[in-house]
Amino acid sequence: MWRAFGRTTRPLQPHQVEGAISALQLDEFDANELRLRAAREAGWKIDPSMLLEEA
């Protein structure tokens, strides 16, 4: 899977990320990790501390 995505120089589109999640049958934790990584590689400035909820 990574070899196929490694050939492109552009950030992955959301539908490509969701397709990879489906193909790899990732659970929600790993799927969200992949979404976060893809967003960061696309240039989004995401602060992980803002994503966590306090119990």
Image (cartoon, rainbow, N blue to C red):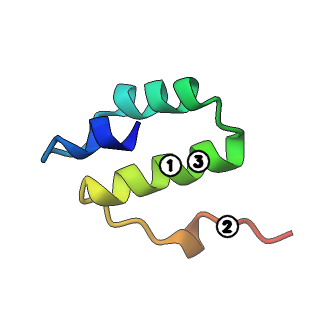
Name the spot of residue 33 as percent of width and height, x first: 56, 54
User: The C terminus appears in which quarter of the rendering?
Assistant: bottom right
The mark nearer the N terminus, 3 or 2, is 3
Q: Position of residue 7 (x, y in %)?
A: 18, 41
Q: Whole-percent x and y of residue 45?
A: 33, 66
Residue pointed to by mark 1: 34
Side of 21 where 12 appears, left or right: left
Image vertical order of residue 18 relative to residue 9, above or below: above
Rendered-image quadrant of the N terminus:
top left
Classify mark 1: helix, strand or loop: helix
Instruction: Name the foreground residue: 21 vs 40.
Output: 21
Residue that badge 3 annotates: 32
Task: Report helix, strand or loop for mark 2.
Answer: loop
Name which residue lies at 12% across and 47% down.
Answer: 9
Residue indicated by mark 2: 52
Numbered badge on residue 46? none
Q: CA distance from mark 1 to mark 3?
A: 5 Å
In-image side of 35 versus 8 (left or right)? right
Amino acid bearing label 3: Asn
Identify whether 18 is placed above or below 43.
above
Q: Nearer the viewer, mark 3 or mark 2?
A: 3
Cβ–Cβ under 8 Å for marks 1 and 3: yes
Mark 1 neighbour density, 10 Å: few (under 14) some (14–19) many (20 or more): some
At horizontal 65% and vertical 37% (from top left) the residue drawn is: 26
Q: In percent of the image, x 69 and y 41: which residue is there?
A: 28
Question: What is the secondary structure assignment of the residue under circle 3?
Answer: helix
**In the rendered structure, which disc, 2 or 1, sits on the residue that comes first in sequence?**
1
Tag 1: amino acid: Leu
